[in-house]
Amino acid sequence: MINNSENFTIAFYNIENLFDVKNDPSTYDDNFTPTSIKRWTPKRYQKKLLKLGTVISQIGEENSEVSPVIIGLAEVENKKVLSDLVTSKNLIEQQYSYIHYDSKDERGIDVALLYKSDLFEVTHSETFSVYFEKEPGVQDYTRDILLVKGKLNNEDINIIVNHWSSRREGTKETEFKRIEAAKVVNSIIKELKSNDSDTKIIVMGDFNDNPNCNSLLMLEQESSLYNPFKTVWSRDNGSLNHHFQWHLFDQILFSTNFFDTSNSKLVFSDAQVFNSKFLTQYTGKYKGQPFRTYSGKKYKGGFSDHFPVFIQLKTS
């Protein structure tokens, strides 16, 4: 086990379309097959697994002797890709377990959780749907929200993993979807607190909103969460770059009892974007931005269009 002065790293990473190479007739994964427009071949798939394993194993390494104990993921297709990821060459030694449920998302992508079972003991997991309609009576399916309960350092904690609706059809036009997702998270937290008012809660995800947006402010205010990424985000620092502007859609919020040094065995110490140089484009007009796997249809061979984010908890 980890010694008393150790940091636990808890991370979140949108890994940009981790699809296997087989066509699933029940989802829209047609672009991610060997004969598709993107030519998603077994070789490219294996290369991506190796690259992601390199990243995950290094998140938070400056302040911790071990790779993250818990990592939320966005944009995974199924259990097979998670199995391939945790057993890939650069990650297999870390011995990660995973939790995944298939959602009805139209793109066939879900959230998932990787965790070290020798350090984090899972006691319960379930998913929650976000309901809204494309047109009257026709449901618009999106990613489910994942709740995982467990014990870390002999303390009960609840992890809520999110990947909220995108801004593709316009920021204002789609805001109601992210507000709806925030309401679902707040209702999950209300239920958790009804059983234990001092329960520890961590909410992570790609929210497709920045820390100052209404949806995130709703989480903070209604569920009494602290968002350390409010001060991490700046003109020069974010988790993704769109039209040469940094956004911080990827965030980790938590209940304020992680500040309680007298009653907690886990105390918040740091929050960062993991943007080491090897994860960035080295040259050209996009220098410093995330080195992505695809830019539109064009294969780039990188990691993801997002940087991971993480927090660290000190053991006391």
Image: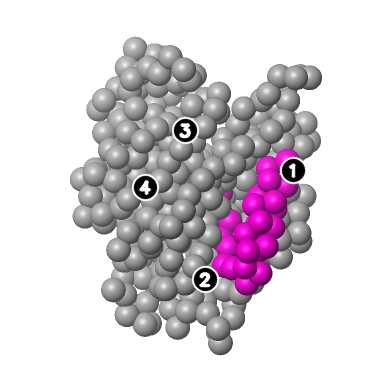
Q: State the extent of the magenta-drawn residues as a range.
A: 179-205
In the figure, residue 253 lies in which quadrant?
A: bottom right
The residue under label 4 is which amino acid type? Tyr
Mark 3 is surrounded, within 10 Å at the Cα level, by few (under 14), some (14 to 19) or many (20 or more) other residues, namely some
Whether residue 45 appears in magenta in the rendering, the answer is no
* Marks 2 and 4, the one that precedes in the sequence: 4
Label 2 – label 4 distance at C-alpha:
25 Å
State the residue position of label 3: 102
State the residue position of label 1: 179
On the rendered image, what quadrant is the C terminus found in?
bottom left
In the figure, residue 29 lies in which quadrant?
A: top left
Residue positioned 30% across, 52% down in the render: 96
Contact, mark 2 vs mark 4 (Cβ under 8 Å): no
State the residue position of label 2: 270
Label 2 – label 1 distance at C-alpha:
27 Å
State the residue position of label 4: 98
Mark 1 is surrounded, within 10 Å at the Cα level, by few (under 14), some (14 to 19) or many (20 or more) other residues, namely many
Label 3 – label 1 distance at C-alpha:
23 Å
* Marks 4 and 1, the one that precedes in the sequence: 4
| Residue 252 sits above or below residue 88 on the image | below
Whether residue 181 appears in magenta in the rendering, the answer is yes
Dominant secondary structure of the residues highlighted in magenta in the image? helix
Q: Is residue 256 left or right of residue 155?
A: right
Label 4 – label 1 distance at C-alpha:
28 Å
The residue under label 2 is which amino acid type? Asp
| Residue 212 sits above or below residue 33 on the image | below
